[in-house]
Amino acid sequence: MNPVGGKTAVCGLIGNPVEHTMSPVIHNYLAEKTGTDLVYVPFHVETGRLADAVKGAYGLNLLGLNATVPYKTDVMECVSSIDPSAEAIGAVNTLVRTDDGYRGYNTDMPGLYRAMRFDGVEVAGEQVLILGAGGVARAVALMLLEKGAEQVILLNRSREKAQELAERINEKAGRAFARALGLTEYGEIDASRKYLCIQATSVGMYPRVEEAPIEDLSFYRLVHTGYDLIFNPMETRFMKLCAEAGARVFNGYRMLLYQGVLAFTLWTGVEISEELAAETYEQMLMAMEKHG
Ligand code: NDP
């Protein structure tokens, strides 16, 4: 890490909990390798203290913040302006200092898109299954619309939530882009073709690693590529089932890397090469091995 001096810029993460975050590894490594005088620190923010935390960070001259669970939506109330794509997604994960407060951005979705490009996963012209209809699923559906996917089918435990989301996306698309199904209604999907499937529920996350949103292998036979947004564990049960049915599989770890890379560029203006991003990814893997 760079030595800290009087001019060192400070960035950090606000969330609850933040104790197992990988973000300090990403940003402190990028700062060191790009010769940027910056340190990145996690800040545990207690329930009800979010507005105080953001105000305090601005008062302390912090250059930027990331926001994570459970603050990605609520933090929108604490910024002075919001980037239009973060506004459309309805979530902010990056705050960038401006003269009159922080401006909110969302680097999760461009991060996912950059990770998919790296992994050679095509989006344009694809028919995509999304498992889930929560905050991340909504952002994923918008990203897929923007990047030219042909159609998405949202499968969610609560069918009404999937239906509501499909209606909102279709309004934006101006066509029947999204269709909603319950999590058990996959029998209605046209089985004469295969799909990219993005796993955007929290099912299978550590510590409940033995769970998958759907168990039936016949569902996974519809999938040519399974992309789980979960990054802990590195191989989820969803990924194992996809692989068993013959699909390519990816986890959310590279999305985590690129959302950080994009935030670092927003704060510093420093562009990160693919080589440095790959090196940073290795650092994340090493840190995970070390700390679990
Ligand atoms: P939300 O709480 O908004 O949504 C959770 C989703 O999971 C809902 O669709 C919910 O269905 C579904 N779900 C929860 N429990 C179950 C269950 N037991 N059975 C079936 N479905 C269930 O969460 P987010 O959208 O914010 O986040 C989803 C996941 O995305 C996170 O857990 C995280 O792993 C991942 N993520 C990864 C990132 C990365 O950088 N790689 C960044 C951000 C998130 P219902 O509507 O029926 O309740």
Image (cartoon, helix red, strand yellow):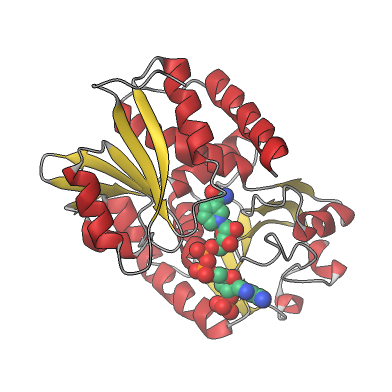
Going 48% across and 73% down the picture, which residue do you hit?
166
Relative image position of residue 39 (x, y in whole percent): 38, 30
Q: Quadrant of the C terminus?
A: top right
Q: Is residue 13 visible?
A: yes
Relative image position of residue 38 (x, y in whole percent): 35, 26
Tell whether 283 sits left or right of 30: right
Tell whether 124 sits left or right of 46: right
Q: Nearer the viewer, residue 54 or 265?
A: 54
Query: Which image quadrant shows ligand 1?
Result: bottom right
Q: Is residue 149 visible?
A: no
Tell whether 96 sits left or right of 142: left
Residue 175 vs 281, above or below: the answer is: below
Going 71% across and 70% down the picture, which residue do you hit?
213
Q: Nearer the viewer, residue 251 or 12?
A: 12
Residue 93 vs 89, above or below: the answer is: above
Q: Nearer the viewer, residue 19 or 143?
A: 19
Relative image position of residue 178 (x, y in whole percent): 52, 69
Furthest residue in direction left, as rendered:
100
Q: Nearer the viewer, residue 100 or 169?
A: 100
Q: Quadrant of residue 96?
A: top left
Going 29% across and 58% down the picture, which residue do you hit?
87
Relative image position of residue 37 (x, y in whole percent): 33, 20
Going 75% across and 67% down the picture, which residue do you hit?
212
- Numbered disc total: 0
